[in-house]
Amino acid sequence: MTPREQASTEAITSSPLLRRAAPVALDVPPPITEGGADQQSREREAIFRRGLALADVLAASTALFVCLNVLGSDSLHLVALLALPLILVAGKVHGLYDRDELVVNKTTMDEAPELFQCATLYTLLIVLLEGSFVQGSLSPVQVVGLWATLLVTSLIARQLTRVIARKVTSPERVLFVGSRQSYRRLESKLPPGDRRATLVGRMSLDGLVGEQVSDFGTKALHRLLEDRQVHRLIIEPSEARPQATMDFVREAKATGVRVSLLPRILEVVGSAIEVDDVDGLTLLGVRRFGLSRSSKVIKRSFDATGAALGLVAMAPFLFAITLIIKLDTRGPVLFRQTRIGRDGQAFEMLKFRTMVEHADQLKAELEEHHDPSVGLFKIRDDPRITRVGSWLRRSSLDELPQLINVLRGEMSLVGPRPLITCEDCQITGHDRRRLQLTPGMTGHWQIQGSRAPMAEMVKLDYLYVASWSLWSDTKILMRTALHIVARRGM
């Protein structure tokens, strides 16, 4: 049992629920606050919801100002003030104010498709009502400017709003219902100090064999949640007792607590599923593994265009880095290493050299500093790294020559992590399906930190292949850019 699961249940063992269910392990004391857990949740959600509404109004105001005063010389009628609430209507239609209460990880990037649609709808409304709002006529440039400015400012304003909202509110208190193994995995994703949520403990449904959760009654569960000030339940469905899980979810929802499910099936099929309603019977359509022929063409076109534009735009910078490396230490500018690519084919991956010459020959001497449980060979404060190399690695600029690999078709902008031969040999069974896609310059593994254990990295790669979409690639590229700016390193 982990330290967070150390038993401290004296204060709640009198609950009727706990007499019949498996014990709860709790180590985070309830906060000393006024009002119940449900009231705290509502107050927190109100701060997020009102802040997002204000952010959208400010974004719409900025977009209208740019459209009329920067891209044109028009002015607004007084009645144009009615145009600002239209953005709230468009946002409500797309569910942009209701999503945050349903999720633990409240991210702006995930709602970018809805913001795209919202900006399109709002721009269309302004164009249709142009005669009532604007003194003059909007040009095509102004219309495009209104749409683009609204989309960009909405993304920025919403992200800043969520950052501020997290600082002025306390994290959600989460009680996990499920296995110890899944609890430990969730614990690694939500470490102490995480502003999104605080894990207060774990309980199991294993003790419900032969009984129905409804026998406990909603009141007993509600009393437990109130005693520990629990804002959200994360429930792992029980394969052994599916009916007990369904009953527990019903009882939990009746208490008013926020409920999230941890479906293990998504670890196999990914998130690319389609909800199918067959006369009230819900089915989940799972798309086939891998990419269709048309998807491969789209992905390759996206990669080639992005790599070509990147090389042209970064050419002066690449030349400057080449000079710096030459002046710093002896040896070649580029480091070439054999990696395993799509369908197990080996290729030569390019990077700017960040280590001393013949660094591979010194690897054996450093094996004792490597943690074999991680899987990938990485050590802190590697003595082989040069001064310039340390800066290149922190900024991820050493990866730029891989744009050449992308142009050659050996790599993709986004994809599974390319492994060296000895690391690839450790991947067996179904996990080798990650090689059905071209390895990428970046991916989920880069955002999560390349020090993630190999087992975790392989799972991320598998889910990426199972759930690929052009939007997912775009989102990963944007998150990678934020990751690099934050200088969290590779």
Image: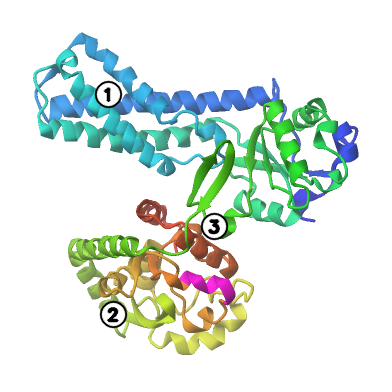
Q: Which residue is mark 1?
A: 61
The main secondary structure of the magenta stretch is: helix
Compared with residue 10, is residue 343 higher up or lower down, i.e. above or below? below
Residue 365 has which mark?
none
Tell me if 27 is positioned left or right of 332 in this view: right
Q: Which residue is mark 2?
A: 333
Q: Which marked residue is nearer to the observer: mark 1 or mark 2?
A: 1
Q: Which residues are magenta?
A: 428-434
Q: Which residue is mark 3?
A: 269
Q: Position of residue 430 (x, y in %)?
A: 56, 71
Q: Is residue 22 visible?
A: no
Q: Earlier in the sequence, mark 1 or mark 2?
A: 1
Question: How far is the residue under mark 3 from the one under mark 2?
Answer: 42 Å
Q: Quadrant of residue 230?
A: top right
Question: How far is the residue under mark 3 from the one under mark 1?
Answer: 42 Å
For the C terminus, the image quarter is: bottom left
